[in-house]
Amino acid sequence: MLVTVLLLLVTLCAKGGNGVETEEVRRPGHVSVVIVGGTGDLAKKYLWQGFFQLYVNQVNNGNTFSFYGGGLSPADQATPVLFDILKAVSCSKDVSQERCALLKEQFLRLSRYRQLKSLEDYQDLANHIEKKLEEEGMTEAGRLFYLSVPAFAYADIADKINSSCRSTNGAWLRVVLEKPFGHDFRSAQVLASQLGSSLKENEMYRIDHYLGKQVIAKILPFRVENKKFLDPIWNKQHIERVEIVLKETLDVKGRIPFYDQYGVIRDVLQNHLTEVMALLTMRLPRNLSSSEEVLQNKLQIFSSLLPLGKNQAVIGQYQAYRSEVQQELNKTKDHVSLTPTFAAVLAHIDEAQYEGVPLLMISGKMLDERVGYARILFKNDIFCLKNHNSIHCKPKQIVFYFGHGSLQYPAILVSKNLFKPDLINSEWKEVTEHSDISVLGLPISDYYVQTPTEQRDAYVELISYIYAGRKNSFISTENLLASWGLWTPLLSSLASSFPRIYPGGADNEGLLDIRLKGKDIAYNSEVVIISRDQMGGTSGNGFQVMQGKFRSADMVSAWAEELVEKLAADIQEAAEAAVHESGVFHLALSGGSTPLALFHRLALHHFSFPWRNTHVWMVDERCIPLTEVQSNFYSLHNHLLQHVRIPYYNIHPMPVQLNQRLCVEEDGGAQLYEKEISRLVNGSSFHFVLLGVGYDYHTASLFPGHKLDEFGESLVALTESPAKPHQRMSLTFSAINRAHKVAILVMGKGKHELITQLSRVKDNPDKWPVTGVKPANGRMVWYLDYDAIIG
Ligand SMILES: *[C@@H]1O[C@H](CO)[C@@H](O)[C@H](O)[C@H]1NC(C)=O
Ligand SMILES: *[C@@H]1O[C@H](CO)[C@@H](O)[C@H](O)[C@H]1NC(C)=O
Ligand SMILES: *[C@@H]1O[C@H](CO)[C@@H](O)[C@H](O)[C@H]1NC(C)=O
Ligand SMILES: *[C@@H]1O[C@H](CO)[C@@H](O)[C@H](O)[C@H]1NC(C)=O
């Protein structure tokens, strides 16, 4: 026993130096490993080998094991299949042949096939484990279930495990799951809540096999070890861009029924590349071994990512994919799949450290080479007048090279004009012997190169992490949902986009090259090789922006996206005209969800907007603190103001909170706002007022049934809403109708009924408040999207 404890301490200490520590104090004893789907492809290719390796590494550490391959087939059929797989496991080079033969023999003796179909099968397994423990007088350390089965079976199996396979003696339970974890945010949430009813969060190990790759697992430790070099340069002042790239040469033939449902974004970007991006950009945890801290810092990055829209992605599809789909899904010759097999996505992190730094994530099938890497390209601020070949004139970069490609081995490369990275432990070594190759534009001799002393398969690594309870190498529920939260809106906005068709392999040439245009991304070459035929019979959207009349005022209509573009352009035009004329632009904005797309458009695309000369006012406000999510100002601030360079003193939230109370008449908030308007806005006439219309025809916070004429000449008033929070502060018609221009934005199918009604009714502000908008000397324009018009 003493020897065991000592050995355990030695391993813990050895690992400690590596930043790897066990999360639960390991209790020596017996571990039962169950691979459900134990004769399937993944198990055959990787899992058994991984568990054999675990066994070899742990056999002298005081723990004992039994291994079960589970499956739906009866034991007499599946047992020979399982043993054929088990016989194929191999030892690493440093194990002698005799010792290897002995270890394999032991491993085979400890392994069994069990049919796992019904609840009774799981109960029998649990009874068997308990009986064995009792017979051999062993304490139990834990039970590890590896579900190598299609995702639809997870919930059911997890339920069976919960109801019959939990140990009663305090041993741990760990259940390992493989992707896909859902198809979008909703389905991931449903699956997570189903699993959550059977398993505790700390019992679930969702695998992203990328996190088992040695170079990727090393990203955080590398950042910590080289903090003194990286701290001064790991920011927007120095980073030109970050690229995370996984190129594949294979097609997806034979996997189409799965792949066509997912496509490259769900298959690779949502999980592998997103995880790498988070590891590269998250704040460094003070304690690398603390799963909670790593998770919290990762989640922080997810919440700081700017939303991904259509303009932040390009997609492609290899030419032969279409006929492969027709074949494998039994479709006719005119069937077209829009599933992308290539995607490049441009993300941005809305944090001072990374503001404006492009983060590119790129992956595809049927490309020219197989390679995976993440590169941080730094700005080179040295101008070389003559000798462009001297090292300080060359690209400055750090490359995390996952494998394959020209280099052929996993490595971390730091260009010599940056710094010489520290080597902290013996698991990595420096490579100094170089063949004559280049990596991403630099000859390898221009890099400091580090590689693992021993290359290990990702599954071998992950299985050892599961065994060690190292949760930070797995995907927690929160992490998963945050990632889907980022990708789901992009996936929906791309759902009807046509991918660019590419021939595949070397023939792709420059067809998939991409170009960054501010916050947007596009293919570099404009060649469009989508023929009518490839598009199938779809008519496309023929509608453009149209001008017309609505309620005898001007109307602009278009599909939502174009409508928002047009409105944003009109606001900028008004701003430039006003600034030209009087040096200042007074803009009054509404709250609610409809203008959010407009705010994003203004924040992300209108870089020349004269914000410095713009004053932003509120059309109305809820009587709640401005820091609450439902506050109109809060939303305006989050979606627009914090992204643009507008001086603080040009921002005018409504004073709904005075003397530590909300909208009390005596506090005179409305009068205060009115005074501020009169003081700053010439003639109290805003240049541009943006309004919306509610389902009850209210506009601003002017609701039906309110005696709106009671406000007289006041510009600002306290009003009552039928919805909570009831109290509001609002501009009155007196203020609105003095404006130079009033825009009323109405979007979405849900507003169709309202628009139909409005096209018929006469002016009657008491009943339909929006009909009271009548600028005396200004212009009024309705911005209606086709969904609202057509329904
Ligand atoms: C597991 O099953 C038990 C009932 O057998 C139930 O009370 C419990 O909530 C389930 N889930 C977890 C996470 O333990
Ligand atoms: C780091 O976190 C691990 C796991 O939570 C913990 O065991 C260890 O004590 C922590 N180390 C420090 C220095 O706080
Ligand atoms: C397509 O048809 C073949 C033969 O008729 C059949 O074996 C196969 O299951 C079908 N595949 C799908 C996806 O329907
Ligand atoms: C204020 O408005 C009046 C009337 O619209 C205009 O004549 C005057 O030039 C404006 N003043 C400034 C400073 O813009």
Image (tube, rainbow, N blue to C red):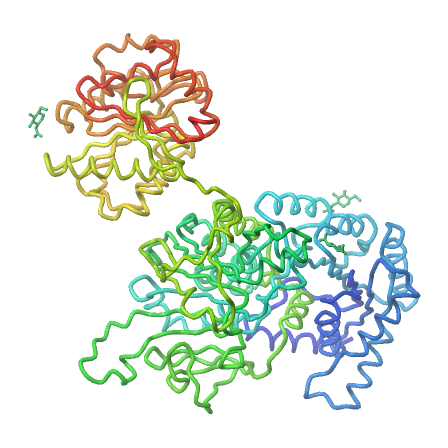
The answer to whether any part of residue 657 appears in the image is no
- The residue at 23%/75% (across/down) is 382
Percent x, y of residue 507: 47, 71
Q: Would residue 525 be found to the left or right of residue 50 on screen?
A: left
Q: Quadrant of residue 721?
A: top left
Residue at (26% x, 25% y) in the render: 742
Query: Quick check: 609 above or below 76?
Result: above
Residue 575 horizontal/vertical position (percent): 19, 37
Q: Position of residue 524 (x, y in %)?
A: 36, 62
Residue sitting at x 15%, y 36%? 577
Q: Looking at the image, in which quadrant does ligand 2 appear?
A: bottom right
Image quarter (top left, top right, bottom left or bottom right) of the N terminus: bottom right
Q: How many marks?
A: 0
Give the camera-side residue of 345 and 20.
345
Residue beneath the point at 34% across and 26% down? 660
Q: Nearer the viewer, residue 35 or 326?
A: 326
Locate residue 519 relative to residue 46 in the image: left or right.
left
Picture layout, residue 60 above or below residue 462: below
Residue 443: where, in percent of width, then height? 39, 84
Q: Is residue 71 visible?
A: yes
The answer to which of 34 and 572 lies nearer the viewer is 572
